[in-house]
Image: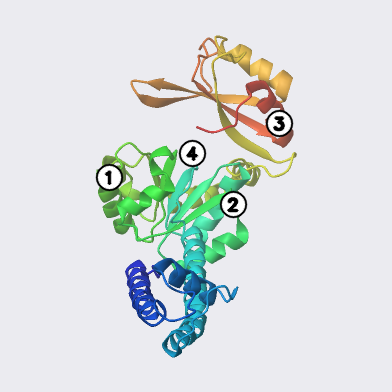
């Protein structure tokens, strides 16, 4: 990025002040004691300089000596250069502000958002689902043209972009990492991802990290390095492919529910937190199951509890399990069911 040369500007301004101070001093030498002169003090000379440079030309202060008139010509001619300098500096300043905004250097106020480090076609596909689910995303990229591409598809209140080297951890703070819900490491190579996660954990220890792997055998290695979720692309695609071969209807349904439901007749699997005051808090699982089906046409399929500081997923648990505050309910629903559920829970889905 081209940064403004403030030092050069300050030196130029200091040089202009010195030159005009010398010209004012010389002007007073000619005019101070001349008969009929109206420029006899420093105040008069500065006023004459200003109304000449600004081309106002009141005519209340005018030189009467040949030397004074000569300096007046210098003031008048130099006004063109001064105007050009001022306009150029202002244009440069505005251009710098726009570039800083476009490159994300002003930072973002996103909270509970997703931070994506690296951009590619896969990342674009992920963002489309996140935006569809109402999540905000901060994309960090070191490829300048990427920012213009992202801005064509998403609004600033949906996606914040930051142009930065991935290892400039101080600059990465502009993406409000400390307030992010999760960081998606979207680099090209598994080894590069692992090294990057290890380095990033030194600067941001308490964040949740997710990576996609080409080699599924590295899952345990990434978990040991502090990654919260390590997902094997090949493993997921192979399972879905096999399902299409021997149970195609299940495969179609599975593919639909792992994506965001854009239409009311499309299905999705979501999770909602049980906030304090939720009518389901304190009830048993089987009662919540029937109430949700009756009121919202939603199928309750799982319950998540925090145990020993870790999330524990109970898939279709026993009917007598009690639902408590801050638990998460995992549910299958269509678009209309989601709207009804939001009215019941008064919160958005997700962790």
| Label 2 secondary element | helix
Residue annotated with mark 4: 111
Give residue 325's position: percent from left, percent from top. Answer: 50, 16
Q: Give the alpha-carbon distance from disc 2 to disc 1, as whole Å.
A: 29 Å
Would you say residue 350 is visible in this rendering? Answer: yes
- Residue 137, placed above or below residue 287: below
Question: How many residues crowd mark 1 within 10 Å: few (<14), some (14–19), many (20+)?
Answer: few
Give residue 239's position: percent from left, percent from top. Answer: 50, 47
Residue annotated with mark 3: 339
Residue annotated with mark 1: 203
Question: How many residues crowd mark 3 within 10 Å: few (<14), some (14–19), many (20+)?
Answer: few
Residue contact at pointers 3 and 4, CB within 8 angstroms? no
Q: Give the alpha-carbon distance from disc 2 to disc 4, as whole Å.
A: 19 Å
Q: Give the alpha-carbon distance from disc 2 to disc 3, as whole Å.
A: 20 Å
In the rendered structure, which disc, 3 or 4, sits on the residue that comes first in sequence?
A: 4
Give residue 116's position: percent from left, percent from top. Answer: 44, 51
Image quarter of residue 347 = top right
Q: How are the colours assigned in the image?
A: rainbow
Viewer-nearest residue: 246 or 74? 74
Residue contact at pointers 1 and 3, CB within 8 angstroms? no
In the rendered structure, which disc, 2 or 1, sits on the residue that comes first in sequence?
A: 2
- Residue 328, placed above or below residue 322: below
- Residue 139, placed above or below residue 321: below
């Amino acid at each position: 990025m081209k940064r403004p040369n403030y030092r050069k500007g300050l030196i130029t301004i200091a040089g202009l002040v010195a030159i005009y101070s010398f010209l004012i001093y010389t002007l007073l030498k000619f005019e101070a004691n001349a008969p009929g002169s109206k420029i006899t003090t420093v105040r008069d000379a500065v006023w004459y300089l200003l109304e000449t440079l600004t081309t106002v030309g009141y005519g209340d202060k005018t030189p009467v000596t040949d030397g004074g008139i000569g300096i007046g010509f210098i003031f008048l001619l130099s006004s063109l250069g001064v105007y050009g300098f001022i306009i150029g500096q202002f244009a440069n300043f505005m251009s710098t502000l726009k570039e800083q905004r476009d490159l994300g250097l002003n930072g973002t106020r996103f909270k509970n958002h997703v931070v994506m480090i690296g951009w590619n076609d896969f990342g674009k596909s992920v963002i489309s689902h996140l935006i569809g689910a109402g999540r905000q995303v901060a994309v960090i990229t070191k490829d300048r043209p990427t920012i213009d591409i992202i801005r064509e598809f998403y609004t600033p209140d949906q996606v914040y972009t930051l142009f930065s080297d991935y290892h400039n951890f101080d600059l990465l703070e502009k993406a409000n990492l400390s307030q992010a819900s999760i960081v998606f490491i979207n680099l090209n190579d598994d080894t590069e991802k692992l090294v990057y996660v290890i380095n990033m954990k030194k600067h941001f220890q308490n964040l949740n990290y997710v990576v996609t792997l080409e080699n599924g055998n590295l899952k345990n290695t990434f978990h040991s390095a502090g990654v919260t979720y390590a997902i094997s692309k090949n493993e997921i695609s192979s399972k879905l492919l096999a399902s299409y071969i021997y149970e195609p209807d299940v495969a179609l349904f599975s593919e639909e529910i792992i994506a965001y439901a854009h239409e009311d007749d499309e299905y999705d699997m979501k999770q909602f937190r049980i906030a304090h005051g939720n009518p389901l808090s304190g009830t048993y699982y089987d009662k919540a199951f029937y109430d949700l089906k009756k009121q919202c046409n939603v199928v309750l399929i799982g319950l998540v509890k925090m145990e020993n500081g870790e999330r524990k997923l109970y898939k279709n648990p026993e009917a007598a399990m009690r639902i408590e505050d801050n638990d998460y309910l995992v549910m299958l629903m269509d678009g209309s069911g989601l709207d009804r559920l939001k009215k019941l829970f008064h919160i958005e889905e997700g962790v």
